[in-house]
Amino acid sequence: MCAARVYDSSGTAADDARPEPLRICLWSGPRCFSTALLYAFAQRRDTRALDEPLYGHYLRVSGSPHPGRDVVLAAMEQDGRRVVEEVILGPVDRPVLFCKQMAHHLRDLDWGFLRHTANVLLIRDPRQLLPSLARRLARPALADTGLAVQTRLLATLEEWGQAPPVLDARELLLDPEAVLRTLCGRLGLAFDPAMLSWPPGPKACDGVWAPYWYDGVHRSRGFEPYRERTSPLPEALAPVLAECAPHYERLRALAITAAPRPDAAPAGAPG
C-alpha cells in the first residue's frame, strides 16, 4: 500500500521529497455523482484524473449492452490486467492519480493490486439510484449497481488492514466542502477549494462514453444541491431494490457525514 503523504495544492510534498504517487481508486456504482467527484479532483494541480480505465475490459468480459458499447470497445484497452499494470499502477506525471472506477468493472480481475491503492467507496441510496439508472439501462439488476461488489470490496480491504473511506452521495451533495475536507484528510491530502467548482461542458478527462451518460454533469458548474426524489419507485424496480437495500445499509453505516450522526460508525483512512 502506498503511504499517504501530505501535499499542498501545488503538488509539493510537505518535506519536498518525491514519494511514490498516491494512487486513489474511487469504487462507485453508476448514477452516484462519481463524475462530479472526478471533475472535483481534476481541478487539483497535483492530480491526474482518469475516467473508468477498466470500462473496456468490463464490456469485453461481461457482454453488457451498454450505450455506446462499440465506441468504448474500439477506443479502450480491453485487457484489464494490462490496464492495471500500465495505467493504474503505471507511471504517473503528478503526485496523485485519481481513478474514477465502477466497482463492477473488477469482474474477472485479481484484486491484489488494491493493496497498492488508496480505495474509496461511493454509494447512493438505491431508491434514488435505480430510477436514474433505469433511464439508461432498460432492466437494471443488482449487478449493474455495483453494490454487491462494494460490500465484497469492503470486507476484502478490511481483511488486508485497510479501512476505506465511504462516501454517500446524499451527504456529499448536502455539504460538499465538509465531506471533501474529511476525505482529503483521510487520504493525506490538503483540501483544495478548487475542488468545489469547474467550468461547464465536456472535460479533457472524460471517457468516450460521455455523450451517452454525462449530459447532466456537463451542465453543472459544481456539486448540485441535494434534491430528494419524491415520486414513487416504479413497481418493476421493487425486486432489485430489495436486493440492493442490505448492501447499501451496510456501507451507509460507515459513510462520512455532512454533520455528525450518532448512529454512524467512523470511516477510517486507507491502510
Image (cartoon, rainbow, N blue to C red):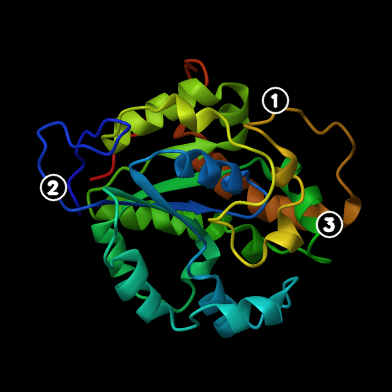
Considering the numbered disc 1 on the image, is that residue within a helix, a strand or a loop?
loop
Which residue in the protein does label 3 denote? 135
Label 2 or label 3, whichever comes before in sequence order: 2
Report the residue at 40% width, 25% height from top: 181
The disc at residue 225 is 1
Residue 140 point in image, percent of width and height: 75, 63
Residue 266 vs residue 118, the one in the foreground? 118
- Which quarter of the figure has residue 71? bottom right
Residue 258 point in image, percent of width and height: 52, 21
Q: Quadrant of the C terminus?
A: top left
Give the CA distance from mark 2 to mark 1. Answer: 38 Å
Considering the numbered disc 2 on the image, is that residue within a helix, a strand or a loop?
loop
Residue 80 point in image, percent of width and height: 43, 78
Residue 218 point in image, percent of width and height: 71, 46
CB contact under 8 Å: marks 3 and 1:
no
Which residue in the protein does label 2 denote? 18
Badge 3 crowding class, 10 Å Cα cut-off, few under 14, some 14 to 19, many 20 or more, is few
**Front position among marks 3 and 1:** 1
Q: Quadrant of the N terminus?
A: bottom left
Report the residue at 46% width, 47% height from top: 121
Considering the numbered disc 3 on the image, is that residue within a helix, a strand or a loop?
loop
